[in-house]
Amino acid sequence: MGLANDRIISQVENLLRGSVVIPSIQRDFVWMRPDVRDLFDSLYRGYPVGALLLWKTNLAVPFKTAAVVQADKSVHQPLYLLDGQQRLTSLAWVYRPESKADGRLIDLRFDVRTEEFVNPSAVQRKDPLLIPVSTLLQENVQFYQVLLKAGVTFDDPNFDAWTQRMQKVNSIRHHQIAVITYESDDYEEVAELFARLNKGGRRLSKGDLVYSAIAARWADGLDTMDSFHQELRDNNFALNREAVLRLMSLLAGTGAHHIKLIGAEVDETALKEAWQDTERALRFAIDFLKGECSIPRSEVLSSPNVTIVPALLLHHRDGKLRPGASQLLRRWVYTAMAFSHYSLQVEGKLDAEARLIKSREGEGLFDELIRRASGTRSLDSALHPRDLEQKYSTHPFFKLLYIAALRGTARDWATNIAISDQPLNTGATIEYHHVFPRARVQGTYAKEEWNSLANLAFITGQTNKMISSRLPDQYMTEIATERLTEQWIPEEPELWSLDRFPDFLAARRRLLANVLNESLGLPRYDGQTAPQDADELPADDELIVEDPGAPTLAVAEGEPRHREQ
């Protein structure tokens, strides 16, 4: 990595000459006119304006059309501008107004009276003492002639002071800026560096960078991809770019490391074909997840990557499954969710699963997929009630219990109407309810108990308000027995009293464990099976890949969304 200082105007000229280009991973120019004005004000006052980061590589990196006209493309390998596009482009537009690619000039003026840079209005443009900055930036400018043209004579008492101010604007040309040159032939490494540089606001992901690079190579690519993402959102199944690109990369034959999609060997035709396959595969997968797995929307998934295996499998089998395969694939989906299969080593796991899908058939394929998704657990080891201790609404088990409630057509405790994930009536919005209200237990029992899965149920907002802060032994007698059974509430009334709260939790954990065992195709807990120590969450920094958010359910009024773990 090289570090040097250079005149800022020299770097602007390099951009205009084409010896510095904009890599396709860069976003478009986004600054507004006030941003350009503020940049010049900072340079005039000698404030630091940051460094430029250039990338030197032997790779044939795709680059995009800059927002300036680069008249003389360099015959040598160009340098790629990783950080500084907004600043250099702004300077170029003012320094060489004719270079602005869209032809619409940036009219930036300098008020010699107030030393302010101005984006002038139509009236202000008539003011002769608002001097075009582009004029003042040119080499060998004759400042006295500028003032004379503005009607300021030599005997004006401000003549010398205003001349010095214009000279100071011109000296922006000589402002020294740090230029860092990063040498690397590893595109993925540079993409990660670029993503880290752009942490202001929404952090750019590698998926964002790859989308930009594809758009630079495929003329209608961005519009095509954005249109499909909008279709997913309209169907309540929005997926992040990373997951979609991993699937696209697998279908393109470049593996799950989607950064390889921007390799030189993947041309526009290959990108179009891979994207068409991606859309087709995801439509198969989402129909399967909604219909067979009762997953109503993407937020209920533990990770968007869970869609990839069903998409690959259904794509390669033309949307058809053999008898019994649907249940096995559903079991894989639930298993991958339950044990946070994609919390680590996502690409490596997907590459292995893609090879399996191509090379195996029948139960042997699903046995191996499920074994891998189970992690370190034995394939047919039942969940123990103790596995549900200290599990909260953020845990994947909560999402699987929600799915089980929907699949079992659980009904609301007051209305006796089946709960709906997306009701039209706002009063019927599902909330997760503390069976023993928080207000009644938090002073007596630990938060790890009253906030755990075993104390949560799914009811509508209007029913939650009806229950308010009453204890179960006060309100459950008003609820039909079958409504409680549908949500796995222990039927013994003696467990509904405040002093038996720990016993209620233990009894409900036993019931919930077997709900999960049934969903996962595991044996029932028989009261003797020892728990396994395999369901441990990864470290915080490893959870970045896996979204740990709970289903987007409302919470009882006044209660925060719980993010424990």
Image: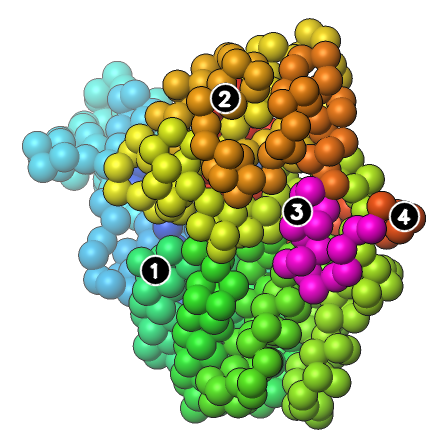
As drawn, 164 above or below 244: above
**Residue receiving disc 4:** 528
Q: How far apart are the alpha carbons under marks 3 and 1?
A: 24 Å
- Between discs 4 and 3, the one toward the N terminus: 3
Q: How far apart are the alpha carbons under marks 4 and 3?
A: 22 Å
Q: Is residue 274 visible?
A: no
Is residue 563 found left or right of 510 in the rendered image? left
What residue lies at 65% left-to-right and 15% top-to-bottom?
A: 497
* Numbered mark located on residue 235 in the image: 1
**Residue receiving disc 2:** 477
- Between discs 2 and 3, the one toward the N terminus: 3
In x, y percent, where is residue 233? 36, 57
Query: Which is more toward the observer, 17 or 501?
Result: 501
Q: How far apart are the alpha carbons under marks 4 and 1?
A: 44 Å
**Residue receiving disc 3:** 397
Q: Residues within 10 Å of mark 1 (few under 14, many from 20)?
A: few
Q: Residues within 10 Å of mark 4 (few under 14, many from 20)?
A: few
